[in-house]
Amino acid sequence: MLARLLFSSLLIASQIRAQHITFLQTQNDTWNSTFELTSQQLVNVNFSDTQATNLEIAVNFERSNWALGSATQDDFYKAPANTSSLPAGSVIKVQYFVNTTSFALPPNTALSRLSYTTKNLLNDTIPASAYILWPYLPLTYPNLSSPRPGTNSSKFPVVAWAHGSSGVFAECGPSNLRNLESQYSAPYELALSGYVVIGPDYQGLGTNQSFDGSEIAHPYLVGSAAADDLFYAVQAAQSAFAARLSKEFVIMGHSQGGSAAWASAIRQHNTPVDGYLGSIAASPSTNLSGLITALGQALPPLLPMLGTQAIKALQPNFNISRLLTAEGQSRYQLAKDISMCNSAAGELLADFPTSDRGALLHPNWTTVPEVADFFGATAGPGTLPISGPLLVLQGTSDLVVPYQFTDAAVAQTCAINNGRGVHYAKFAGVTHVPVLYASRRIWLDFLTNRFSTVGNVTTSRTCVTVNHTSLPFPVENYQRELGHRLELNTQSYQQGRLGF
Ligand SMILES: *[C@@H]1O[C@H](CO)[C@@H](O)[C@H](O)[C@H]1NC(C)=O
Ligand SMILES: *[C@@H]1O[C@H](CO)[C@@H](O)[C@H](O)[C@H]1NC(C)=O
Ligand SMILES: *[C@@H]1O[C@H](CO)[C@@H](O)[C@H](O)[C@H]1NC(C)=O
Ligand SMILES: *[C@@H]1O[C@H](CO)[C@@H](O)[C@H](O)[C@H]1NC(C)=O
Ligand SMILES: *[C@@H]1O[C@H](CO)[C@@H](O)[C@H](O)[C@H]1NC(C)=O
Ligand SMILES: *[C@@H]1O[C@H](CO)[C@@H](O)[C@H](O)[C@H]1NC(C)=O
Ligand SMILES: *[C@@H]1O[C@H](CO)[C@@H](O)[C@H](O)[C@H]1NC(C)=O
Ligand SMILES: *[C@@H]1O[C@H](CO)[C@@H](O)[C@H](O)[C@H]1NC(C)=O
Ligand SMILES: *[C@@H]1O[C@H](CO)[C@@H](O)[C@H](O)[C@H]1NC(C)=O
Ligand SMILES: *[C@@H]1O[C@H](CO)[C@@H](O)[C@H](O)[C@H]1NC(C)=O
Ligand SMILES: *[C@@H]1O[C@H](CO)[C@@H](O)[C@H](O)[C@H]1NC(C)=O
Ligand SMILES: *[C@@H]1O[C@H](CO)[C@@H](O)[C@H](O)[C@H]1NC(C)=O
């Protein structure tokens, strides 16, 4: 009966539509951007026509993923000068409602954006940006409290999400990307599971200019700076949405964000924040200098380019010619001028063989003192005590963060933490980003445990390592990588492929 009713209403709908026939269009393969390099830019990098075309395609791909146009043209990302005296963790601007039509979000999630104050590595207060992804049916846990005592809050449970490496320039902030950069790997799953997701862009991404107009350089891979962004974004969101959010929160991150989540557990050890319940660090970057030594000549050229911007965050007057060759400098400058993120920057450096880093870096680059300072600033995760619990997730086939580095960081942390606080889960045959998909059940259980035991104080648990090796099928039978991406449907016929 119901089926027949539905069928007849579909028939009626198609008859009505038949009266308004329009020509269908094939969805663009040029995406939603028509960027072209200027002749001066081409001269500066001395690119062949093929190289130029390839780079333009990658830049146009990247720009087609902007949800609301260029971040550098969007007033949301600019902080008014009169907010410069606000302490870190303050709200600058709130967009309670963001029209999500141009984002590729799961249905029945909602989006807000927030700008707030954080601290840079020089201890200055600076502006930064973040998104908040809201669930349709938030989870309720009985013992959560309101961020503002005396307020009757709905106490929706909060997870701060620390995204993986997206790039180092303004346009690389997830709050302006259609899929929020990390999509179903975590933030979408978190919201669909009932958590409110607070996703900071990290300082220098999204918002890249300070109150006085000066540049905010992104301190790539410096976990302590990202940890500040995470804690201050949570604090600001809790003050902007005091009637909705819980005071309690968990921090979760992947790769660059895995080191940020780990650094958050260290920050919590040194500067406890009420409401912190623990962290989840997936494929965490630790021991950068050790990794670079191990990579030797196989150092991917993108890494020094991203690292150069991080050195600028530590030493704003750093002269990049001390590190980069003339060719390296002109590439870096172009990446910065047009704000390339990882897709375009990868294409920009595609002709540099990984076996010859001399194309980009002076041979003596490891002796530059600022490089040592940068490595020093990234150290922390794996060498300092933490406030547990910390759930660490690692695939054994990860080529970006080899599991041996995570093994060592976990072992050392447990040794200096009296053998307590870390739950280490390893996944046989799993790679870098996919570890979040393989381990989804485990991190959701961790969150349930953290939020449902609030008020029931238990001592930090003994360190444990669990190897997940026993699968229903041979590991080769499983989809290995994320081989798809999210695109908007722009044409009517595409809706028909989604099922009624
Ligand atoms: C294709 O992209 C261009 C911009 O590059 C836009 O003007 C045009 O409307 C798009 N066409 C369709 C069918 O989406
Ligand atoms: C530009 O590239 C061409 C071909 O790769 C090369 O022959 C030429 O020397 C380069 N010019 C400069 C100024 O680097
Ligand atoms: C293309 O981007 C512009 C902003 O840059 C936006 O207004 C427009 O809706 C986008 N179109 C599509 C089909 O994504
Ligand atoms: C800054 O100025 C705007 C008006 O220009 C005002 O609405 C806002 O409250 C001021 N913010 C602070 C922190 O003083
Ligand atoms: C969101 O934007 C779309 C496209 O511009 C528009 O059709 C829709 O009405 C907007 N939604 C709301 C709630 O404003
Ligand atoms: C950082 O700034 C705060 C004030 O904003 C000050 O209390 C603190 O001592 C400073 N820390 C360092 C290391 O300079
Ligand atoms: C909060 O709500 C409870 C019942 O839902 C009520 O008894 C209490 O007075 C409220 N407190 C405030 C501060 O509004
Ligand atoms: C912010 O980024 C844009 C795009 O890369 C750049 O043009 C602009 O100069 C940057 N702002 C500052 C203050 O450096
Ligand atoms: C490294 O070499 C470059 C170019 O040869 C030179 O300008 C720079 O001073 C050297 N740096 C150090 C730390 O030796
Ligand atoms: C909630 O907190 C109270 C103390 O504040 C405690 O007695 C109770 O066991 C807690 N409930 C749970 C489920 O942990
Ligand atoms: C508190 O934790 C203990 C130990 O994990 C458990 O046995 C007990 O049931 C918990 N109490 C509540 C109220 O959840
Ligand atoms: C997990 O596997 C590693 C080898 O990858 C092994 O050294 C370690 O003992 C195993 N740990 C446990 C708890 O089974």
Image (tube, rainbow, N blue to C red):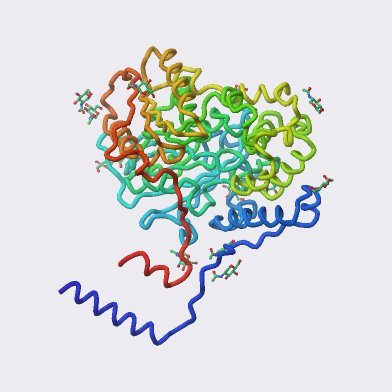
Q: Which quarter of the image is occupied by the N terminus? A: bottom left
Q: Where is residue 208 in the image (x, y as percent from the top left)?
A: 64, 43
Point out the quarter of the image occupied by ligand 7.
Answer: top left
* Above or below: residue 28 compared with residue 365: below
Asked whether the viewer can see residue 205, the reply is: yes
**Can the viewer see residue 267 in this picture?**
no
Q: Residue 386, percent across and down? A: 44, 20
Residue 377: percent from the left, percent from the top? 60, 24
What is the total number of numbered labels drawn onto the structure image? 0
Quick check: 46 above or below 420? Answer: below
Percent of width and height locating residue 296: 63, 26
Name the side, left or right, on which 119 lies relative to 361.
left
Q: In which quarter of the image is residue 439?
A: top left
Residue 433 lies in what quarter of the image?
top left
Depth order, front residue of 237/386? 386
User: Would residue 201 appear left or right of 58 to someone viewing this image?
Assistant: left
Residue beneath the point at 53% across and 31% down: 228
Q: Residue at x 77, y 53 (%)?
A: 42
Quadrant where the image shows the C terminus: bottom left
Instruction: Identify the image quadrant of residue 60.
Output: bottom right
Farthest left residue in view:
1
Q: Nearer the viewer, residue 337 or 135?
A: 337
When the figure is inspected, residue 295 is found, relative to residue 95, above or below; the finding is above
